[in-house]
Every structure is written in C-alpha cells, then in structure tokens.
Amino acid sequence: MKLEIIKPPLGATHKEKRVGRGDSSGHGGTSTRGHKGHKARKGFSLSYNFEGGQMPLVRRLPKRGFTHLKKVYPEIINIEEIDKVFDENTVITPALLKEKGIIKKGVIVKILGRGEIKKKIEIHAHMFSDNAKNKIEKAGGKTVIIKKQEHN
C-alpha cells in the first residue's frame, strides 16, 4: 500500500466554499459576511475577552494580593550529586558548584538529603535539610551555613 493511493472515506470531504465569485454562486455580493458592521469589514479581529460590550469577567472580578518580583528561590542539590562529583576533603561553595555546572545562578543554595554520602566533605550553603545535615556529619563532613544577603 502506498500513501498516495489512500483516500478519505466517501462523504468525509466536501468542496471548499468559494466566496465572492458572483451572485449566481450563492456566495456573491456580501460574500457570506452579512450587511455592514465590524464583522463585515476586512481586517476585523475580536479580542479574546470581548463580551459584546458587557464588562468583561476579568474586569468584574476583584483583584487580591500581588506578586513579589524580587523573590529568589533556592537552587536545590542532593548529596548524592555532590558525592559523585567531588573528592574527599573538598571545601564546596556555591561558586565551586556553579563552576562545575551543578547549579546555574547560585544566589541561594539548599542541600537536600537524597542518596548517600561516603566522603568527608565541608559544604558551604545557605540552607540544609535536617536529613542532609545528619548524613554529612555522620560521614565526618562539616556543614557551614552562609548568611543570606538582601537582594535589591
């Protein structure tokens, strides 16, 4: 079977409506647009929220609260990733994590406790989960919390 042989079933397709081809076609004159008004004109487009002049829903509903544009979310790293990439007795900082490509921005870094860590590593980060802190200290490592700076 070839794709060019396949045809749609009978009645599934119909002729394209050809408008503006004379009165005898049935679609001449106004070309199925009716008489006058916005919709009869070329180039007319209706906005998605237009409700016929009625006050649109988006303007009728009350607005509450606001979005804080300066909020910075922490970048998270699990200790299993750190265990794979870094060697024993390494001092890990957000700058080093960024250099290795583990994080993108490094504004705020949080260490989470998924996986196991077997190396003695000192980690500097802004936040640690309790689970991560316990696992790092159990492996003989050290956790250092970096103070967060005010972001303007």
Image (cartoon, grey):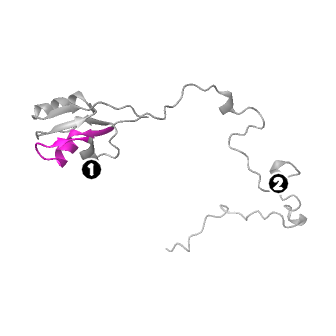
Residue 152, horizontal then vertical, whole percent = 44, 34
Mark 2 lies on a secondary structure that is loop
3D distance between C-alphas at marks 2 and 1: 59 Å
Residue in the picture at 27% in, 41% down: 94
- Mark 2 crowd level (few <14, some 14–19, many ≥20, 10 Å Cα): few
Where on the picture, by quarter, is residue 135?
Answer: top left
Left or right of 58, for residue 110: left
Q: Which mark is residue 15?
A: none
Residue 62 forms part of the magenta stretch: no
Discs 2/1, front: 1
Amino acid under label 1? Glu
Task: Please say whether residue 132 is visible from this viewpoint.
Answer: no
Q: Position of residue 24 (x, y in %)?
A: 89, 66
| 41 sits left or right of 67 in the view | right
Vertically, is 46 above or below 30?
Answer: above
117 over 16 or under it: above or below: above
Residue 96 vs residue 53: left or right?
Answer: left
Q: Nearer the viewer, residue 27 or 106?
A: 106
Verify CB contact (< 8 Å) between mark 2 and mark 1.
no
The residue tagged 1 is 99
Q: Residue at image x 70%, y 33%? A: 56
Amino acid on which disc 2 is placed: Arg
**Residue at the image position 78 percent from the left and 65 percent from the top:** 18
Can see residue 7?
Answer: yes
Q: Position of residue 4 (x, y in %)?
A: 55, 74
The span shown in magenta is 75-93
Judging by the rendered image, the residue that carries numbered circle 2 is 41
